[in-house]
Image (cartoon, rainbow, N blue to C red):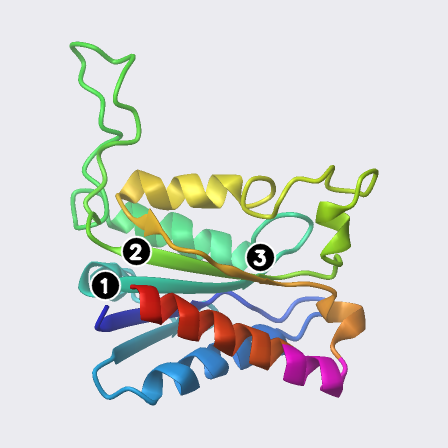
Amino acid sequence: MKKIFIINGGQKFAHSGGQFNKTVQDWTVEFLSKNNDYKIKTTHIEDEIDLQKEVEKFVWADLIIYHTPVWWFQLPNLFKKYLDDVFTQGHNNGIYKSDGRSRVNPDINYGTGGLLHGRKYMLTTSWNAPATAFTLPGEFFDQTSVDDGVMFGFHKMNKFTGMEKINGFHFHDVEKGATPENIVIFKKQYTEHLEQTFKNL
């Protein structure tokens, strides 16, 4: 894992300023910059986007790291548009060639036409919801994890391109719990996750 592409999916909207995901991106770059072997490219979805250059970043990278808040149990609107536009630009252009099926037998092999095989991706999300909303009986998410629930489609999207998922990291209770003390804890826990992840790659 030498070439890392980091995408900041945070944006300014209503009461959200996008600052936390910028901070997480900074933590990631800080961690990776300690090792001179890593080459890093970044994108912030609020910046002016050149679709072909973004496709080339996906093709270039060994590992894509996504940082995104979750709004109304989905991706922010600009991040969704970014992915729609960039992945469509990547049709027969490095990201995917088809849905994988043949006209001879269209019932099988759906989702096998990706072109990003050999690459991995990692997802971080940030939530207002506490972790217990996903784990306790009777709570909102019915004991369904972030990855198996709300972000299930996101993971299938990446699998469609041929990429392999590695363990991600989810920040909980960010809106109400982002005290200076908790930010220090968030950084410590996330850095430990990165250390363990990159040690095992």
For mark 1, give the secondary structure: loop
Q: Nearer the viewer, mark 3 or mark 1?
A: 1
Q: Position of residue 146 (x, y in %)?
A: 60, 48
Residue picked out by circle 2:
120
Residue picked out by circle 3:
76
Say what amino acid the circle numbered 1 marks.
Answer: Asp
Where are the magenta residues, as a range?
179-185
Q: Nearer the viewer, mark 3 or mark 2?
A: 2
Q: Say whether residue 4 is magenta.
A: no
Q: Residue at x 48, y 70 (%)?
A: 193
Q: Residue at x 71, y 56 (%)?
A: 131
Label 3 with label 1: CB-CB less than 8 Å: no
Q: Position of residue 14 (x, y in %)?
A: 72, 67
Q: CA distance from mark 2 to mark 1?
A: 6 Å
Say what amino acid the circle numbered 2 marks.
Answer: Lys
Label 2 with label 1: CB-CB less than 8 Å: yes
Q: Is residue 15 visible?
A: no
Q: Position of residue 114 (x, y in %)?
A: 23, 40
Res 186 quadrant in image: bottom right
Identify the mark nearer the N-term, 2 or 1. 1
Quadrant occupied by the C terminus: bottom left
Q: Residue at x 28, y 86 (%)?
A: 35
Say what amino acid the circle numbered 3 marks.
Answer: Pro
> In the drawing, what numbered circle is on residue 121?
none
Q: Is residue 21 visible?
A: yes
Identify the mark nearer the N-term, 3 or 2. 3
The rendered magenta stretch, by its main secondary structure, is classed as helix
Above or below, comparing residue 38 to residue 132 in the picture = below
Residue picked out by circle 1:
62
Identify the mark nearer the N-term, 3 or 1. 1
Q: Residue at x 60, y 43 (%)?
A: 150
